[in-house]
Amino acid sequence: MTELEPLLQRIEQLTPYFGRAREDLTALSARARNQDYKGVLQNARLVVEMLLRSLVTTELKQTPGKAMLDELLNKFRQQAHASVIPTNILAHMGTVQAWGNLSSHDHAGGLHEAGVKVGLEEAVTSLNSLVAILTWYKEHYAQEPAAPALGSASGTGAGASSGRRTALVGGVLLAGLVVGLGFLARRSDQTPEFRGRLDALYAENGEPPPPAECQEQDPRALKPLLEVAPRLSERVPEDSRAQAATTALDALRARQDWRPEGWYHVARASLLAGHPDVAAMSKALECPQGFAAAENLAGRMAAKAQDWKESAAHYSRAAELDARFWKPRFNLGIVQLQEKRVDEAVPQLERAAKMAPGVADVSLVLGHAYAARAAAAQASGKEQEATADRERAKAAWCRARDLGSSQAQALCKQP
């Protein structure tokens, strides 16, 4: 439950902004705390379906009718509607969809066979994606929660009128006091607000935040991180990424007393800008408890320098630090494929595909790994194994195509 609680607290902060989806969000939190993880996945799926139905109505100017989640998602994966929902948010929606589908079906045969088991790991994976989706939706579409109405006095005549005036004056004074106190509180400590927003950005990018001991805690440090983090987001179009990162890097280097979290953002910006800052990367890795996202970034930096051994070591460390972090497993699988270690690459990529079922690139590369293993089996005269892996490759490529990968289109059509 410790792993779920920060996610649930963030969802509860966002819940008031989501109209009729609030009921399912509230139920989701209650089910999570009661360890009803199947229910968590089902409620998360329903929430995403509601959001998509609303977007079909407001953005596409269409009537969603009886369309279910799969059909709604496919609408926004079409080229004509590709600009409505960012690619990374569509991937998060695909993750919620996949786990929601799993939890909604029995999948077993006889009544005495074991059914689907859904645990904490699956719930955390789905809710990480849900937090990213809700955060994005709130920024772009959600309406402010309605303010509660002031209470009114009952009665008739002058006494009642006087009572109403007194209540109104008292209410106004009380409201002014509350607003004043709230303003002072916000001025005195904005850390929880800033921290929550930054953690939501980590979730949106599918990355775990650093341990508390290595996080920035001063609002004066958190504020610039919040200002530059969107420029380092995976939502930034690839052709604009280097320029956006360069601008962010200039702002980040204005401060030199970062903790490991701040240095991680410096290193991330430098890599995206095309000028990897090895010193900043080293400082980000100084977190005593280990920092999974920083280890994964260090792996990417080593891979850029074509130091495959160092890269693989960092990816392995990142995967050890956070069992739910799919990116280092995906990246490690790519390195192993490049080094022709196909039998090692396939399990890593299968694990990444299970953890990130809505990410097209994972299924695409997994298809390549199966195809490579099929070729090796064919060369060894193991025709049956080769045939099975060719079928697995095609299934993975078709899944990637359905998730929006243009590279997988022709591969899926292969006989």
Image: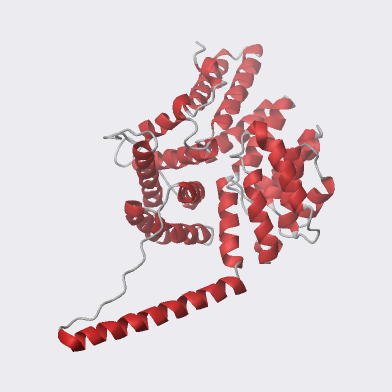
Q: Classify residue 231 as left or right of residue 298.
A: left
Q: Residue furthest front?
A: 158
Q: Residue furthest bottom?
A: 159
Q: Residue at x 62, y 50 (%)?
A: 322
Q: Classify residue 294 as left or right of residue 387.
A: right
Q: Quadrant of residue 98?
A: top left
Number of marks present in the image shown = 0
- The relative height of residue 404 versus residue 261 in the rendered view (above or below) is above
Residue 294, horizontal then vertical, whole percent: 71, 49
Q: Is residue 88 visible?
A: yes
- The relative height of residue 286 versus residue 355 in the rendered view (above or below) is below
Residue 191, horizontal then vertical, whole percent: 61, 67
Residue 410, horizontal then vertical, whole percent: 53, 15
Q: Quadrant of residue 278?
A: top right
Q: Is residue 35 visible?
A: no
Q: Residue at x 75, y 52 (%)?
A: 252
- The relative height of residue 308 versus residue 148 in the rendered view (above or below) is above
Q: Residue furthest right?
A: 279
Q: Nearer the viewer, residue 176 or 365?
A: 176
Residue 291, horizontal then vertical, whole percent: 70, 53
Q: Residue at x 30, y 86 (%)?
A: 166
Visual colour scheme:
secondary structure
Q: Nearer the viewer, residue 216 or 159?
A: 159
